[in-house]
Amino acid sequence: NAGVTQTPKFQVLKTGQSMTLQCAQDMNHEYMSWYRQDPGMGLRLIHYSVGAGITDQGEVPNGYNVSRSTTEDFPLRLLSAAPSQTSVYFCASSYSGLGRSDYGYTFGSGTRLTVV
Amino acid sequence: KNQVEQSPQSLIILEGKNCTLQCNYTVSPFSNLRWYKQDTGRGPVSLTIMTFSENTKSNGRYTATLDADTKQSSLHITASQLSDSASYICVVSAYNNNDMRFGAGTRLTVKP
């Protein structure tokens, strides 16, 4: 049981490049989400999904796209990377989202992205 | 202004000592509060979850308290170990809301 797997672990992009951060979970969780973590700030929600085919925006969605074609995968796409998107990105999943579940959130190990 | 404030920002203690981390929140209406431990280079891992009716919950050497009236929570670590060195993050959820609000965390360093 691998939990939540994120790839790559590290990435350096040039301004304007695009890329996809991968996230996969093998726990059959319905709820998946993407966060970014910046120094001195709490994790901020980028996008989330409550099930296959359903996605919605979080607190800081601009510059990012997501899709959820399967229960297992929730990729995050950076359309045109900007230095402001330099951050550590975490994918998380839960049996049932909405922040109310007694089931905790399982986080991936993160992707450290630098945009130069 | 962040709806979840944690203090102190960082803390250094000697191995074997106790410490208490604080979390104040304004998230409303309150649903639950979680404490997470985040080791360097890793994702957060859940330590405890507390709902409105709970005021104390323990997980080994970790004890979380919640005062829903004053909107404060604390995480007490007893007999600290080197492996306790990590960031501790307070996360508060609002009822009927998809939103979880994360504190910026307290960076704890335990020295031998």
Image (cartoon, coloured by chain):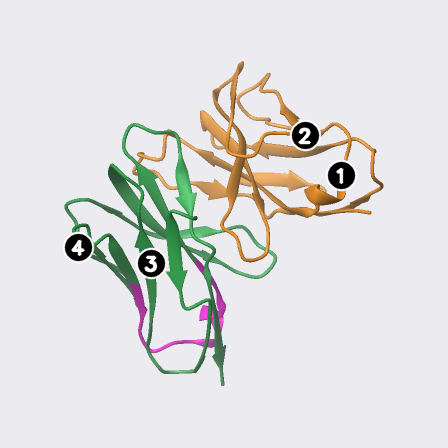
Chain colours: A orange, B green
Q: CA distance from mark 2 to mark 3?
A: 31 Å
Q: CA distance from mark 4 to mark 3?
A: 14 Å
Host chain of mark 3: B
Residue A82, numbered label: 1
Task: Please name which of the two marks, 4 or 1, marks the residue nearer to the observer.
Answer: 1
Q: Quick check: A11 left or right of B18?
A: right
Amino acid at circle 1: Ala
Residue B23, numbered label: 3
Q: CA distance from mark 4 to mark 1?
A: 44 Å
Count of marks overlaid on the render: 4
Q: Which residue is mark 2?
A: A63
Q: In the rendered image, is residue A1 in sight?
A: no
Magenta region: which residues?
B75-88
Host chain of mark 1: A
Q: Secondary structure at mark 4?
A: loop
The location of residue B1, given as percent across then percent down, is 43, 48
- Do badges 4 and 3 share one subunit? yes
The location of residue A111, given as percent across then percent down, is 66, 45
- Residue A64 sits in which quadrant? top right
Residue sitting nearer the eye, A41 or B44: A41
Magenta run includes residue B78: yes
Amino acid at circle 2: Gly
Q: Residue at x 34, y 49 (%)?
A: B34
Task: Please name which of the two marks, 4 or 2, marks the residue nearer to the observer.
Answer: 2
- Do badges 4 and 2 share one subunit? no
Q: Are marks 2 and 1 in contact (CB under 8 Å)?
A: yes
